[in-house]
Amino acid sequence: MTDAVTSRIAPLEELGSYGKYEAGPFAPGYGVTLGNALRRVLLGSLEGAAITAVQITGVQQEFSSLPGVREDVVQILLNMKKIRLRSFATGRVELTLNKKGAGSITAGDITPNGQVEIVNPEQVLMTLDSDKASIEAFLVVERGVGYVSADRLEVEPDGEARPRGVMAVDAIFTPVRKVNFTVENTRVGQDVDREKLILEIETDGTITPEEAVRKAAAILVGQFAAFSGLGEAPAPAPAAAAGGNLLDLSIEDLDLPMRAYNALKRAGIVKVGQLLSALDGGEAELLKLRNFGQKSLTEVREKLVERGFDVPESTLPLDAAFDEEDDEDDSDEEVKA
């Protein structure tokens, strides 16, 4: 059992995107334990924003070149990957780049968008080498965690392949570039076996090192909270009747699978209240939605029940549980036709 010694963290140095902090004192062995945990969360579990796809007018695939542009498309995409952004949107956002005339084009030339802030506008993207040269590009920005390769981004969130000419880009969502820690001995009174943790963090500028530490610590506290409740009865799910404002919750808050979410959103069902009304009116109408089959219906019902909502009983006969994939394939064919 360890002694009850109060541990604290204090900044040693903070300069822009760099921060150095000292935490302690800790019992022997705790410095490495906490340092490793924080490092892993800082590098792999913090949410950020990144460009996930690019479409350049006149370009069908990345192994191409553009007239009047010094760099080839591969180099342009590599440069665009270096753009660091803050996204204030919950979903994807499309940015536009439209430039004409000789000169260097930077991230600052991207058309301003109130939902996205570019923190390194000086990042060079390409160079136009004549006054007649021009470029038009569309950049998709999404939120995510960690690193996602372009191969995994070749498919849209709803499961469909990206349109021809839309090039997926390796997405580096993590806002933390480097993390390093060291453990040193420290003294508390007559006890010389205590440890202190020296933590160094470098971010990409989209968040401060202090924010990164706080978010990482909150994630760890949340994960360990599950163990502190071992043996206790689980807390009851919040009842939907506890307040009418719950019906105004966005369906995004249900954490639905992307296919079901997109199908509902396309149909204009964006609030939980609308979804419950649709279920009350009969599931047969919901099953007519594109890419929304029996599997999606079951997933939606389960998510609503998990959140404590009173879900209307199913009005479908048992033999209505048809195969969703067949239904979605037929729907896709009709749309393509």
Image (tube, rainbow, N blue to C red):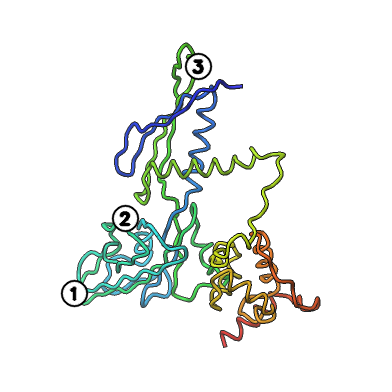
How many residues crowd mark 1 within 10 Å: few (<14), some (14–19), many (20+)? few
Residue type at mark 1 is Asp
| Mark 3, residue position | 193
Tag 3 secondary structure: strand
Say above or below: 239 vs 139. Answer: above
What residue is drawn where x is 52% and y is 33%? 34
Q: Secondary structure at mark 1?
A: loop
> Residue 147: x percent and y percent?
48, 53
Q: Label 2's element?
A: loop
Q: Is residue 166 above or below residue 305?
A: below
Seen from this angle, which residue lies furthest right? 318
Residue 323 at x, y percent in the picture: 73, 75
Which callout, 1 or 3, points at the residue further toward the start of the chain?
Answer: 1
Residue 131 is marked as 1
Viewer-proximal residue among 245 and 191: 245
Q: Nearer the viewer, residue 282 or 162?
A: 282
Mark 2 or mark 1, which is nearer the start of the sequence?
Answer: 2
Query: What's under tag 2, amino acid-wise?
Result: Val
User: What's the residue at 63%, 82% (across, down)?
Assistant: 331
Q: Which residue is mark 2?
A: 119
Return the residue nearer the eye: 82 or 249: 249
Mark 3 Cα shell of 10 Å, populated few (<14), some (14-19), many (≥20):
some
Q: Position of residue 107 (x, y in %)?
A: 29, 62
